[in-house]
Image (cartoon, helix red, strand yellow):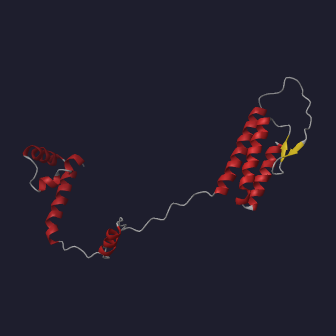
């Protein structure tokens, strides 16, 4: 079908189309079966329209419209859609953020740690473990950036602790310990 021609069919049926566009439309209808079919459907509707008696509405809408007009507000004739539900709770988002930070940190540690063998053997000394603000251990041997990142995670955890379920809290604390041991 061709929308540019179908838009003219109503005026064509009513005899309101000027001669030049009318001739162009008739030439198109001579070669286009889908547009001829739409024209035939419109002719059927126009022929049946005078006999159509209509139907009774399922409810009287006027009283609600009148009250709304009197109250100076818009009328809502459709039932309201329930508000969209959130996909994640705040707890889930905090937990996901912490897990994301752990995975990212682990990937960076793994990538940087695999840069190649050291030029000469190095002596590794076990550094003391220092407790962080939440009581979780923060390794003193980790770099300052790592300590800062873990400290920030612990601070976010401390601020959101009261809003987390005990099971979620335990998982987060265990994961922070795993990160620290890494």
Residue closest to the far top: 119
- The number of discs equals 0
Is residue 88 at least partly visible in the picture?
Answer: yes
Q: Nearer the viewer, residue 4 or 154?
A: 154
Task: Name, please, the residue furthest toward the front.
Answer: 71
| Depth check, front residue: 116 or 162 | 162
| Residue occupying image coordinates x 9% and y 43% | 20
50 lies left or right of 150: left
Residue 130, percent from left and from top: 87, 44
Tell me which residue sits at (71%, 55%) in the image.
160
Task: Please report the residue visible at 76 percent of the width from the left and 36 percent of the height from the top.
Answer: 145
Q: Quarter of the image holding residue 171?
A: bottom right
Q: Does residue 70 sit above or below 9 in this rendering? A: below
Give the vertical position of 123 relative to 50 (above or below): above
Check the image and report above or below for 179 versus 39.
above
Residue in the foreground of this view, choosing between 54 and 136? 136
Q: Position of residue 42 (x, y in %)?
A: 18, 59
**Left or right: 126 in relation to 154:** right
Percent coordinates x, y for residue 19 in the rendering: 7, 46
Task: Say which residue appears at 67% left-offset and 48% top-offset.
Answer: 97
Q: On the rendered image, what quadrant is the C terminus found in?
A: top right
Q: Can I make out residue 2 in this image?
A: no
């Amino acid at each position: 079908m061709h929308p540019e021609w179908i838009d003219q069919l109503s005026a064509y049926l009513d005899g309101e189309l000027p001669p030049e566009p009318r001739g162009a439309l008739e030439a198109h209808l001579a070669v286009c079966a889908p547009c001829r079919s739409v024209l035939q459907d419109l002719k059927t509707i126009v022929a049946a329209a005078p006999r159509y008696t209509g139907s009774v509405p399922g409810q009287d809408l006027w009283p609600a419209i009148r009250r709304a007009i009197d109250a100076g507000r818009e009328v809502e004739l459709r039932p309201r859609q329930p508000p969209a539900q959130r996909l994640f709770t705040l707890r889930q988002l905090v937990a996901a953020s912490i897990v994301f930070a752990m995975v990212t940190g682990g990937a960076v540690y793994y990538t940087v740690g695999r840069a190649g063998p050291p030029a000469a053997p190095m002596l590794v000394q076990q550094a003391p473990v220092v407790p962080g603000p939440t009581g979780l251990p923060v390794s003193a041997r980790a770099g300052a950036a790592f300590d800062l990142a873990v400290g920030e995670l612990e601070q976010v955890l401390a601020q959101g602790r009261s809003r987390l379920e005990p099971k979620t809290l335990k998982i987060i604390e265990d994961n922070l310990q795993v990160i620290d041991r890494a």
